[in-house]
Image (cartoon, helix red, strand yellow):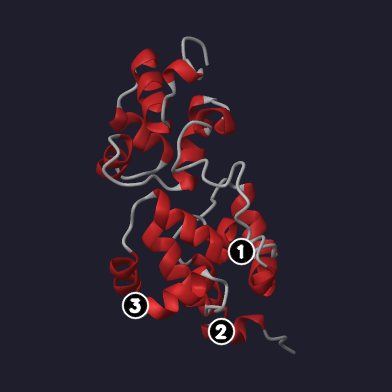
Amino acid sequence: MEDLSFGDENKKTFAEIIIAELKKRKITQQDIANAIGEDYNSLKQCLYCKRPIKESVAIKLCNYLSLDYNEVIKNDPHLNIWQNSNAITFGQKLGKLLRTRNIDHKDFAEAVGISSATLSYIINNNRTLKLNTVCTICSYLNVSIYNMIKDDPKYKLISDSFNTSIISLLKEAGIENPIPDYESTLLNLIKANKYIFEAKD
């Protein structure tokens, strides 16, 4: 990544680095949106910091531009939130995200359909959520479900299920989060089409 400064004197956010790279390579935002399979308007809003960028989209951008993801995000508070962090549980990570993004707890609770008291219990690790609520929270914040729950022993069964062959295949194909609640959707599809998986004579 020549000509890009990552020093203390000129810390660049992920969006600033990507925009600089696109200009340097004379690639339009429309072209890269098409190349990585993302909506142009949504990508444009992310690059101009009008909405947080999804981790999966950030990875696709870095892969397409052959950039080191960890190097590019190291000065961006929205994407490097877990680096040098003691946050392990889902609640700790959620609390840190809300603080980092200056999201009001009451407004957030209302937006994801839980009470303020429940949100407080979650942040303080006194409540384990159903998978659909975890999916709703992660979708609202545009963060990876797996990264939010993978270190939390309360969600061990759920995080372990992300290692199934289906999920592994998706990850190998570079698809980190095809839809916000893909885990729930996959489970529902399997339940709804149970006969497909039953042995036939």
Q: Label 1 vs label 3: CA separation?
A: 21 Å
Seen from this angle, which residue lies furthest bottom? Answer: 201
Number of disc labels: 3
**Quarter occupied by the C terminus:** bottom right
SS at mark 1?
loop
Instruction: Give yes or no for contact between labels 2 and 1 (Cβ–Cβ under 8 Å).
Output: no
Q: Which residue is mark 2?
A: 191
Give the residue at mark 3.
113
* Secondary structure beneath label 3: loop
Residue located 54% across and 68% down the image: 183
Local packing at callout 1 (Cα closer than 10 Å; few below 14, some 14-19, many 20+) is many
Q: Nearer the viewer, residue 60 or 98?
A: 98
Q: Nearer the viewer, mark 2 or mark 1?
A: 1
Of 71 and 60, nearer the camera is 71
Kindly identify the amino acid type of the residue bearing the numbered disc 3. Answer: Gly
The residue lying at 67 percent from left, 56 percent from top is 168
Q: Residue 130's spot in the image, x, y percent?
A: 52, 80
> Which three-letter amino acid code belongs to the residue tagged 2?
Lys
Q: Earlier in the sequence, mark 2 or mark 3?
A: 3
Most distant residue in the top direction:
3
- Mark with earlier residue (1, 3): 1
Q: Is residue 173 visible?
A: yes
